[in-house]
Image (cartoon, helix red, strand yellow):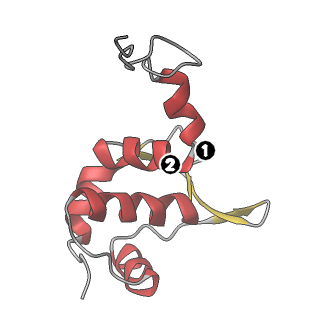
């Protein structure tokens, strides 16, 4: 059995923004849930259980855009959002990491002779 405190997930990770017409895709919502479970050291529930719970929480309003289901008016928030974004777009991590050779000083220590 996986992490099933879906009300807490919605409270911790979903922000409601009526002005945001784009919203979150199905993949983004489930990925956000997986990040939230990982941060909480809990095994995730199946995608079927997750979507059933989202239906029960009224988060089923969707529209199709370019083969993706969109949940308008929803945004990611909290630590799981940051984790999901950096995990799904690792190039962002390198761009902001001051300790990589490409963008800043290195942590490598010179070898003494």
Q: Which residue is mark 1?
A: 21
- Towards the viewer: 58 or 109: 109
* In this rendering, position of residue 33 left or right of residue 103: left
**Alpha carbons under labels 2 and 1: distance apart:** 6 Å
* In this rendering, position of residue 21 left or right of residue 29: right
Crowdedness near tag 1: few (<14), some (14–19) or many (≥20) residues, C-alpha within 10 Å: few
| Picture layout, residue 23 above or below residue 29 | above
Q: Residue furthest front?
A: 113
| Picture layout, residue 26 above or below residue 107 | below
Tags 2 and 1 touching, CB below 8 Å: yes
Q: Which mark sits nearer the N-terminus, 2 or 1?
A: 1
Q: Secondary structure at mark 2?
A: loop
Q: Quadrant of the N terminus?
A: bottom left
Q: Which residue is mark 2?
A: 73
- Towards the viewer: 60 or 36: 36
Residue 60 horizontal/vertical position (percent): 49, 71
- Towards the viewer: 30 or 11: 30
Give the quarter of the image for residue 69.
bottom right
| Picture layout, residue 67 above or below residue 82 | below
| Picture layout, residue 32 above or below residue 86 | below
* In this rendering, position of residue 109 left or right of residue 97: left
Residue 20 horizontal/vertical position (percent): 55, 40
Crowdedness near tag 2: few (<14), some (14–19) or many (≥20) residues, C-alpha within 10 Å: some
- Towards the viewer: 6 or 44: 44
Which residue is rendered at x = 38% and y = 65% of the image?
Answer: 34
Give the quarter of the image for residue 90.
top right
Residue 51 horizontal/vertical position (percent): 44, 78
Which residue is rendered at x = 23% and y = 66% of the image?
Answer: 7
Which residue is rendered at x = 24% and y = 75% of the image?
Answer: 3
Residue 98 horizontal/vertical position (percent): 44, 17
Count of numbered tags: 2
Q: Secondary structure at mark 1?
A: loop
């Amino acid at each position: 059995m996986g992490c099933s405190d879906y009300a807490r997930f919605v409270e911790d990770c979903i922000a409601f923004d009526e002005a945001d017409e784009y919203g979150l895709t199905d993949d983004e919502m489930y990925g956000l849930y997986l990040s939230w479970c990982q941060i909480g050291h809990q095994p995730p529930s199946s995608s079927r259980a997750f979507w059933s719970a989202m239906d029960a929480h009224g988060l089923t309003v969707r529209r199709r855009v370019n083969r993706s289901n969109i949940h308008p008016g929803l945004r990611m928030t909290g630590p799981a959002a940051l984790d999901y974004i950096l995990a799904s777009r690792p190039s962002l991590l390198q761009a902001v990491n001051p300790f990589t050779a490409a963008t800043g000083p290195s942590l490598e220590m010179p070898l003494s002779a």
